[in-house]
Amino acid sequence: MAGHPIQRFVEAHSLTQSAFGRLVGLSRQQVNNVVRGRAGLSTAAMKRIVSASGGELTLADLVNAQD
């Protein structure tokens, strides 16, 4: 499946980027910029995402998506 792992997670769980952002402490615009490759994630944000996803998203997923 193509696309950013955050976008795949959002779609798989019928979330909006805004709802996902609220779960992980990011704005909708920040989530959108990350998904589009316009911005990266801090280590702290990545850890919040892994925790909020119950481990469904991993640090490796998020780091590899930034390459």
Image (spheres, rainbow, N blue to C red):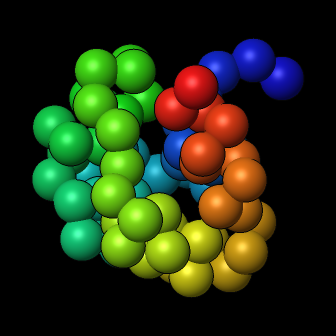
> Whole-percent x and y of residue 28?
20, 45
> Whole-percent x and y of residue 67?
58, 25
Query: Which is more toward the observer, 31 or 43?
Result: 43
Q: Residue at x 21, y 42 (%)?
A: 30
Instruction: Please state if 41 lies on the left or on the right of 4 as rendered.
Output: left
Q: Residue at x 59, y 48 (%)?
A: 62
Residue 25 placement: quadrant: bottom left
Q: Is residue 66 visible?
A: yes
> Whole-percent x and y of residue 58?
71, 62
Query: Which is more toward the observer, 20 or 38?
Result: 38
Query: Which is more toward the observer, 49 or 17?
Result: 49
Instruction: Please state if 31 lies on the left or on the right of 7 as rendered.
Output: left
Residue 64 placement: quadrant: top right
- Compared to residue 5, the image places residue 67 above or below, namely above
Query: Which is more toward the observer, 28 or 15?
Result: 28
- Compared to residue 48, the image places residue 4 above or below, namely above
- Compared to residue 23, the image places residue 41 above or below, namely above
Q: Residue at x 47, y 52 (%)?
A: 15
Total tally of numbered discs in the picture: 0
Quadrant showing the N terminus: top right
Q: Is residue 11 visible?
A: no
